[in-house]
Amino acid sequence: MKKLFTIALVVIAFIAAPTANAQDEFAGLQKSPTDISYAKTDRRAKPTMKVVYSRPQKKGRELFGKLVPYGKVWRTGADEATEIKLTKDYKFGGKTVKAGTYSLFTIPGEKEWTIILNSDLDDWGAYAYKEANDVARITVPVASGKEVESFSIAFKGVDAGYHLVMGWGTTRVEVPFYN
């Protein structure tokens, strides 16, 4: 009986060890999951724009003006700075922005947001943001919409291109990109 008990303990240890190690390996996963949004004409088409960002959760918090201060550069999501890839040239405000990958920063305000395309990539948050590396900036109005728990980015097709739509809580911002 003692031998059977010892064998059972050894088997349990072998089964439990990988589970314990796996839990440790995944302990540092993001609390704000990464997501991707595409601008494309249909499901099978290649996108002309792609945004990679992390989705923080509201969790009952006061968002803009409190968690995300007004008047300060924001990474536009959580974790690493949001990145946008343009596969072709687009008009952004009054400027043509060449195809390429850019960081997408914002400066939220109560009534309008400044939207920034910046040449620095792979930065954590907005801590290393340098205005000197801005490629283009525009200002867009703030609107209201239905409550959204997770920060979200989507594309809406318009006649001359796309609007990149950002929403969190009841705040909505539409950023025009034109052909």
Image (tube, rainbow, N blue to C red):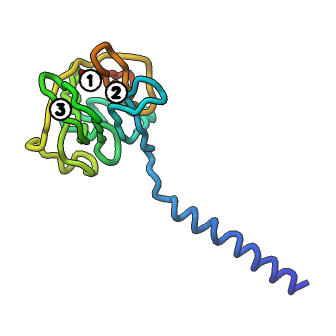
> Is residue 97 something one can see in this rendering?
yes
Q: Quadrant of residue 153?
A: top left
Q: Classify 10 Å Cα crowding around label 2: few (below 14), some (14-19), many (20 and above).
A: some
Point 33% across, 32% down: residue: 49
The residue where tag 2 is placed is: 166
- Observer-side mark, 1 or 2, equals 1
Q: Is disc 2 placed on a helix, strand or loop?
A: strand
Residue hosting label 3: 97
**Where does the image place residue 161, in percent across and percent down from the top left?**
29, 20
- Looking at the rendered structure, the secondary structure element under dot 1 is strand
Q: Residue at x 35, y 36 (%)?
A: 50
Residue that extends furthest to the right in the rendered view of this protein: 1
Q: Which of disc 2 and disc 1 is earlier in sequence?
A: 2
Vertical side of 107 occupied by 123: above or below: below
**Front position in the image: 122 or 39:** 39
Mark 3 and mark 1: Cα distance apart in space: 14 Å
Residue depth check, mark 3 versus mark 1: number of the one nearer the observer: 3
Residue 8 appears at what percent x and percent y? 81, 77
Residue 115 percent across, percent down from the top left: 21, 30
Q: Residue at x 27, y 51 (%)?
A: 122
Locate residue 10 relative to residue 30 in the image: left or right.
right
Mark 1 Cα shell of 10 Å, populated few (<14), some (14-19), many (≥20) = many
